[in-house]
Image (cartoon, rainbow, N blue to C red):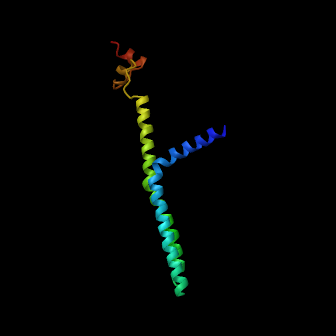
Amino acid sequence: MYNWLKIGAFIVTGRFLKPRLKGLLVLIAFWFLVSFLHGEYRDYVEMSGNTDYVISAALTKIGLYVLGFIVYVFTIERRILNRTQAEIKRKVEVDNPRHQDDGFDFIRQKKKLENPADKLLHKD
């Protein structure tokens, strides 16, 4: 029983990560690069004793983390969302075509529909 749950969770996770994998790998690599560079700067500060820019370096690191995430969301996630919305729209159009021949096309094409009172007035 639990094996089926594990397999199902693995399949769902794979389907979720497949369109996002490259973007996530680039984001993680960017975060590792920022972390590495910040660690190098901290080592430099420890050896030199120059602590003038420690706070700005920490804020820059946090800002770069947030900036990387925002870029990821606007490039990868937005593209995935647009693609799924287009697929949903296409599926709705296939299921419900606009021009169905249901026998009432002659009424839809009229400019003005006449009610019974209009028919009595124009009967002459």
Give the vertical position of 58 relative to 123 (above or below): below
3 or 74, which lies in front?
3
Q: Quadrant of residue 103?
A: top left
Q: Which residue is pictured at 41% across the width and 32% down the height?
A: 93
Give the vertical position of 102 relative to 76 (above or below): above
Q: Quadrant of residue 116?
A: top left
Q: Quadrant of residue 46?
A: bottom right
Identify the image quadrant of the N terminus.
top right
x, y percent for residue 66: 50, 64
67 or 6, which lies in front?
6
Q: Which residue is pictured at 34% across the width and 24% down the height?
A: 109
> Would residue 50 be visible to someone looking at this image?
no
x, y percent for residue 73: 47, 56
x, y percent for residue 6: 61, 43
x, y percent for residue 29: 47, 62
Identify the image quadrant of the C terminus.
top left
